[in-house]
Structure formats: C-alpha cells, structure tokens
Image: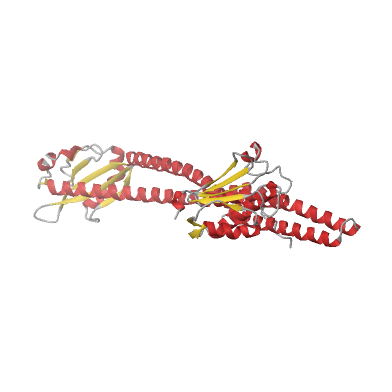
Amino acid sequence: MGERPELGSAHLPRLRRQIAGWYALSWFAGLGILLAVALLEGSERRLEQLDTELQLRATVIYGLSWIDESGAIHAELLEREPWAEDPEFPMRVLAASEEHPQLWGEPLDPKLRGELQPALEEVATGESERWLGDVAGNRVHVLPIFADESLDIRGLAVVSRDLDELRWAQWSFSGGLLGVFMGLAVLGILMARRLSSMSVAPLERLFRSRARFIAAAAHELRTPLSTLRAVAESGQAGDEDPMAALGRVAAVTCTAGRHVDTLLWYARLSSGEQDLRLERVRVDLLIERACEDFPEAQYEGEDVTAHVDGALLSVVVANLLHNAERHAGAERGAGVRIGADAQGLWVQDSGPGFSEAARAGLGRSDHPEGSGLGLVVATMVAELHGGTLVLENGPSGGARVQLRWGTDRAG
C-alpha cells in the first residue's frame, strides 16, 4: 500500500473547503429534518384543532336549540350568540322528520348535501353517535339532536369548514417555515466558512511558524558552518597551525551553539508553547550572572526587583550582550554597557549603531554574522510581559536596545 501523503500548507484550502462542506451538509440535514417534522406536526395539529372546533360548535348547537314533535326548529337562544353566523364555520340544524323537513342556518350546497346524505342517514338512524369526515372539499361534523323526553332523534347539528381556506393557511405557514429555513441555511453557510477558517487557523499558524523557523535556522547556521568548513580546509592544507585551527573551531562551535539555543527559544515562543512563569526576580543579580561571560561589560543601574520570567529574561540578556559585543568590535564585552530600572533594562554598545532599515526590520539583517534573530526573541519576550522592545542609537553613538515591561511589573 502506498503511504498517505503528508499534509502540507498547499492542502489547507482544500481542507478548509471540506470542513465547510461537511458542516454545511450536516446543518442542512438537521434543518431539513426539523422542517419536515414542523410541517407534519403543524398539519396534524391544525387538523386536530379544527376537529375540536367543529365538535365544540356542534355541541353548542345541541345545547342551545331543540325540535318539537311537529318538527319545528327552535333556535332562539342560538341566534343570540354573536358567532352563530360565522361564515368560516357555517352551522345548520336539520329536522329529521321526512314529513316536515326544516332547516335552520345556511342551506347545504347541493353537491355537499348529495355526498353528505349517507352520513346524515347514518346519524339520523342511530347507527353512529356522531360523524366526522371530509366531504366535497369540506371538513364536516354531524351530531344528533335528541327529544327531551326520549332518546328519539329529532334532528341533526351540522357544522362545516372549507378545507381550501385551511390549506391556504397551511401553505402560508409552510412558506413562513421555508423562509426561516432559507435564512438559517444562509447563516449555516456563513458559520461553516467561519468555523472552517477557525479549524484550519492553528494549522496555518503551525506551517507559517515552521517555514519561519526553517528560514531562520538556515540563515543563522549558514555562517558558522561555512566558517567551520573554511577552518577545516585550512587545517588540512597546512595553512594554519592545527592548535590554532582547533581553537577557532571551538569558538565557532560555541557561536553555533548559541545560535541553536536562540533558534530553539524562537521555535517555542513563535509556536505559543512557552508559558510565562512570573516570579519575583532580582534583575540586577540576573544581569551580574549573565555578565560573568562578559567581564569587560559595565553594569550601570540600581538594585531592581520585578515580577518577570527569570528564565526568559536570562535568555534575552545573554542574546543582547552577545549582540552588543559582536557589533562593538571588541571581545569580553569591552565597550558594552547594561543597566536596569523599575521599567525595564537596556544594553548599549560602542559600534556603528542601527541603520534605519535595521530599526524598521527590528534587527541587523545587514550584519554578516546574524539576522538579528536574538532581537526577534527579545521582542517576543517583551510582548509576553506586556511590554515592547525599542531600538535606538545612543546620543554619543552606538546602538541602544531597551526592553520595557512597564511599571506594573516593578517590585
């Protein structure tokens, strides 16, 4: 079996589309099910409500009207009700006597009367206690009216409702639901795009961080490796004393080791894996320990205590001191001054200072021994502490780097 291709940055747009597509499909499926259930439940509920209304009106007819022995219909009480002539629910009282057929209310449509006749006869003869069904496009409820002194059926209460009007109401309800569905569908599409972007964003940051790390590693290690190769070739050719060559190799290896340490810190900070561990730190003592490798560097400051991450601050101080020593053009920290106060710390050298391009790019990219990655790490550490890194030139020449963490870290 072939190996599965590794996911790369080129695959991210396709992955984003796939995530958005699956989310939108799930969203539409859920909405479709809810729409179907709402339409079905709505139709059934409307029919139940209609049947309840028809039964209630037929019962009211039964209670407010009566038919005497001659078949005469008495609906005086019923006529006093304001809803007795509701055009949406025509109500009728039919006398069951074939000799004296009478009607109270709106006459039955001939077509409705013809198709309803079997149901009327069924209820009039006592075969059914009541009848409910659809006839000629109407929902009809038929209820028998009994004599007061016996169980003889004297008439029929008939209430109907035009189903076309009910269907129109159902269509209006369905149209409203469909409009809501379309609105939610558009919202689902927007959410799918947003969520897919949020899902892929960590991968995009990871690939960008990896690309930056690879580029920085290639830039930082190219010079030490080239120097090591030149020293080795010089030693092999006999152009240089072997011991002197070994000494240069050791020095270059030490420099390469510092570059690797800086790269590792850059990788941790840029990936967000480095947590900020704040503690009460004597910044002046931390600087003194860092200056042990730079005995000629001068500390100008006071006893300073701040709530900072001591490990990260040690890395920044070491990087800034190495950077200043390299650009001052002297060894053992000669010409380098470092100080601290409640707002932060600063390092100044006696070199040529920062160019405008270097200050704009926050680094010394024009220097042959480095790309200013140490300053990038210092910037990240400053931002983690809620501060900034400032590059400027001293009033008497030389470069000056200030790491400001703010007064809230003091003490």
- Specify whether 241 is left or right of 52: right
Instruction: Say whether residue 26 is left or right of residue 80.
Output: right
Q: Give the residue at x 13% y 39%.
A: 79
Residue 318 in the image, given as x and y percentages of width and height: 62, 55
Residue 18 seen in the current view: no
234 and 372: which is toward the camera: 234
Say which of 95 and 258 sits in front: 258
- 10 and 75: which is toward the camera: 10
Give the farthest residue toward the right. Answer: 237
Query: Left or right: where does residue 403 sit relative to residue 144?
Result: right
The number of numbered discs placed on residues in the rendered structure image is 0
Quarter of the image for residue 150 reads bottom left
The colour mode here is secondary structure
Residue 143's x, y, as percent? 21, 50
Residue 216 in the figure: left or right of residue 411: right
**Residue 57 locus on image (x, y percent):** 20, 46
**The N terminus lies in which quarter of the figure?**
bottom right
Point out residue 185 in the picture as x, y percentages from the top left corner: 47, 44
Q: Nearer the viewer, residue 196 or 311?
A: 311
Which residue appears at 21% of the width and 49% of the height?
56
Q: Is residue 158 visible?
A: yes
Residue drawn 49% across and 55% down?
304
Q: Quadrant of residue 241?
A: bottom right
Q: On the rendered image, what quadrant is the C terminus found in?
A: bottom left
